[in-house]
Image (cartoon, rainbow, N blue to C red):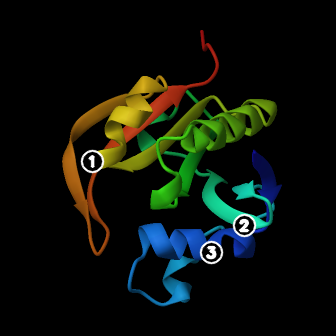
């Protein structure tokens, strides 16, 4: 059985490194705002083993200002290859969305790797704009979801 729980950034670094920063030192898996008081990290566990992760970072984006003032970025979402297509990504995404809603976040946005776009679209996220490169990481699309109605 998979358990999703809120954890420290250090608890998920091994998954970030294995999936998102392959071949790089563990320090490359430490992100800006990891230790910010408003950042939330989620780990997916089977027994004591972390197999997936996601982070929710308070981070505004110019595409949504001034209409929205409470925004967060989903960062470092990853599931170890041997555990993909088992619903763990969806569980992590729901945990992040639930926390975002509890915190009054109106828009959740992120940079999605091309291969992950269909997953996010199935979960109600909108792809916007053209593909772009993030140096050293790969090709991405900008994606977002409105979490609250805004008049």
Q: Give the number of the disc on residue 78.
A: none
| Element type where label 2 sits in the image | strand
Q: Nearer the viewer, residue 69 or 138?
A: 138
Disc 2: which residue: 49
Q: Residue at the location (33% across, 33% down)?
A: 118
Disc 3: which residue: 13
Do callouts 2 and 1 mark residues in contact (Cβ within 8 Å)?
no
Please tell me in which quadrant of the rendered image residue 104 appears.
top right
Disc 1: which residue: 114
Horizontal side, residue 108 vs residue 62: left or right: right
Q: Residue at the location (53% across, 53% down)?
A: 83
Please tell me in which quadrant of the rendered image residue 125 appears.
top left
Mark found first going from the N terminus, 3 or 2: 3
Q: Residue 128, how many percent across, how many down?
A: 29, 33
Vertical comparison of 45 with 36: above or below: above
| Element type where label 3 sits in the image | helix
* Residue 39 in view of the camera: no
Q: Residue 34, how many percent across, how many down?
A: 67, 68
State the CA–CA distance, disc 1 to disc 3. Answer: 22 Å
Q: Residue 25, how many percent across, how many down?
A: 48, 90
Q: Residues within 10 Å of mark 2 (few under 14, many from 20)?
A: few
* Residue 150 in view of the camera: yes
């Amino acid at each position: 059985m998979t358990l999703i729980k809120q954890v420290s950034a250090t608890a998920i670094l091994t998954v970030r490194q294995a999936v998102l920063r392959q071949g790089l030192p563990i320090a490359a898996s430490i992100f800006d705002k990891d230790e910010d008081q408003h950042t939330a990290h989620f780990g997916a566990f089977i027994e004591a083993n972390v197999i997936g992760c996601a982070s929710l970072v308070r981070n505004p984006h110019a595409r949504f200002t001034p209409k929205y003032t409470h925004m967060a970025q989903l960062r470092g979402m990853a599931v170890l290859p041997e555990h993909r297509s088992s619903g763990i990504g969806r569980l992590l995404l729901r945990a992040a969305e639930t926390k975002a809603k509890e915190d009054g976040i109106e828009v959740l946005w992120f940079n999605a790797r091309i291969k992950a776009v269909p997953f996010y679209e199935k979960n109600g996220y909108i792809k916007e704009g053209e593909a772009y490169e993030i140096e050293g990481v790969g090709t991405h699309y900008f994606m977002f979801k409105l979490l609250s109605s805004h008049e």
